Amino acid sequence: MTRFTVYKILSIPRKKSLHEKLVESLKEIDEEKEVNYHFRLGKHLEKIEKFKEAAKTYLKGADKAEKSYENEKAVEIYERALNVLEEHPVQGMDKSKIHENLAGVLERMEDYKKALDHLKKAEEETEIERKLLCLNRKIARCMRKTSRYENALNYVEKGQEIFSKMKQVSFEDEKEKCKLLKEKGMVCLRKNEFEECQNIFQKMKDLSEKIESKKDKAEAIHYLGTISYYKSDFDQAKKYLQRSIEIRKNTEDLKGLAKSYNNLGVVFRNIQEPYTALKFYKKANEIKKEWGSKEGDLSALENMGIIYYDLGELDKSIEYYQKCLEIEKKIEDEHGMAATLDNIGVSYFGKGEFDKALKYHEKSLELKKKLENRSGISFSLYNMGLAYRGKSEFERALNLLKESLDIRREIEDELNVGYSRLWIGIVYIDIRNLDKSKEHLKNALDVFKMVRSDHGMGMTLTYLGRLNILENSLNEAKKYLEHSEKIKSKLEEEGFKLIVDRHFAEYYMKKNRLEKAFAYCQEALRKAKKSDMMNQLGKCRKVLGKIYCEKGVFHRGEKEFQKAIKIFNETGDKKNKAEVLFEWGNSLKEQDIDEKGKISEALKLFKECKIDVSSFLGQ
């Protein structure tokens, strides 16, 4: 306050003289390595009206801040330099370059909207052909990042048109052509046009090899790996991504390295190696922080949420997704928001909070329709189908799952065609249409064998086992369940493991091997308790109640049935509540005890769920 007051009462000449002395003193101090040095020196140069020197000093500081990944400081200093040049125009200062550099830092911070504003200002400030080529490509990238795909393609075409008119083409121009191909390929990837996308990235790879640009070659190989993943060719995806990582380690491309580690994690998650996947996601996140992002790597955080879901830690998965959603809202990444909303919905589904799950899936679907993201739409419809199945609204569930299946067939998403068929088959088991269930489950199994998805095969085999239990084909049931158990030993997903254990418990109960059934059910119950999967916990308690009743320990059976009904009341699962009431009522009748209307209440609920009661009674 004292310094401020003294400064205020000084005359203008006196102030200027003091600022001049400070400039001279600062120039004598060896603080070149410190970012704040240039910022302080620039402010004093402004005060003595040496605006060109002040702007140049600011740019040195901004450059240092950018190189040391002090992104927020770099933005502040670049903006200060631009303000000086706006208020005091000087000759020989390239405002276009400053806007471009500032946009680069903003992109690093994932603020694509502000970056786009500065790139357009840079475009207005220049008429140089080569600079316009580069700016068109960067504008296309920001357009793509903000989901404006057609606008992005327009800027790619503008860039390609400039390139085609060039009489002399340099190495840097060829690199720009590589990057234009990347932007075009990325838009095709977002639109799920995989064949066209693959052709574009192959062209980019060929061109990068011709001009010997390792960085662009690594980028092309990275996206060839990503396309292989989308086409469910996981072995090829691994090879491409690992090769991309090898090249990027030698080019010091931190941003690209983070992307490749992240996508490699996605591949390992899909071949059911979650801990390996988590290791790669953490590497991607660490690299992004090193690169200057306080929040870390958005994709890696999202994918860590998915892994924690797989491991049954649903609250932890939601925590990660909510972090991502906050960042995506801030940077207006609608594509990312749509995916995250879906993932939050999936976690609430796992917790048995089906209405909450539906709200998130509906918001996601709305965004995906706006973005015309066909693959994303299929996921939202699929997830909504599962949520309605949880609510025992089976007709709606089937309609949504079939709609999802149609889109997945259309875009040739083979892996997820398998998952749509799997869950359609499971819903048909729920409503006791076993012939249709068998048809869909066997089709799903064929798909999963073709794409070599252990998780898909394991899930399908265990439900084929359950279907055969219901048909009393116990030898067939055992074959399917034993195959699924072999797969279970290779995978780490808790939800899948407890389903296999629960189905084995039902099989051994049907065989009247009650101790074996009890052991499997206790193991399933342990996994369900450890996780946040409430509906799965209810189903385990339902089976355990039946086992206790079969063993003649009716009071323990009743306790398990009561706990199961409490859970199904909370989750809104009418079908499983009906099954508990039906089993409970029958066990009471066998003891010549008044079942107090439990069976009639169960039959009423079955009817509400549109389940074939006669088929159920005849199981």
Image (tube, grey):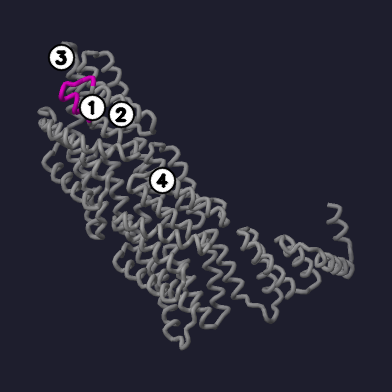
**N-term-proximal mark, 1 vs 3:** 1
Q: Secondary structure at mark 4?
A: helix
**N-term-proximal mark, 4 vs 2:** 4
Q: Secondary structure at mark 2?
A: helix
Query: Of tags 4 and 2, which is closer to the observer?
Result: 4
| Relative depth, front residue between 247 and 561 | 247
Q: Amino acid at mark 3?
A: Glu
Spatial separation of the CA atoms under disc 1 and disc 3:
22 Å
Residue under numbered circle 1: 505
172 relative position to 347: left or right = right
Spatial separation of the CA atoms under disc 4 and disc 3:
52 Å
The crowd level at tag 3 (other Cα within 10 Å; few <14, some 14-19, many 20+) is few
The answer to whether marks 4 and 3 mark residues whose Cβ atoms lie closer than 8 Å is no
Q: In the image, is residue 508 part of the stretch drawn in magenta?
A: yes
Q: Is residue 370 visible?
A: no
The crowd level at tag 2 (other Cα within 10 Å; few <14, some 14-19, many 20+) is many
Residue under numbered circle 2: 524
Query: Of tags 2 and 3, which is closer to the observer?
Result: 2
At 27% from the left and 48% from the top, the residue drawn is: 453
At 48% from the left and 52% from the top, the residue drawn is: 284
Residue under numbered circle 3: 590
Compared to residue 526, the image places residue 553 above or below, namely above
Q: Amino acid at mark 1?
A: Ala
Numbered tag placed on residue 276 in the rendering: 4
Q: Amino acid at mark 2?
A: Ala
Highlighted range, magenta: 504-515
Please state the horizontal and vertical placement of residue 99, each as a whole percent of the image. Answer: 59, 71
Mainly helix, strand or loop, the magenta region?
Answer: helix
Please state the horizontal and vertical placement of residue 599, each as a whole percent of the image. Answer: 18, 22
Q: Secondary structure at mark 1?
A: helix
Q: Quadrant of residue 611?
A: top left
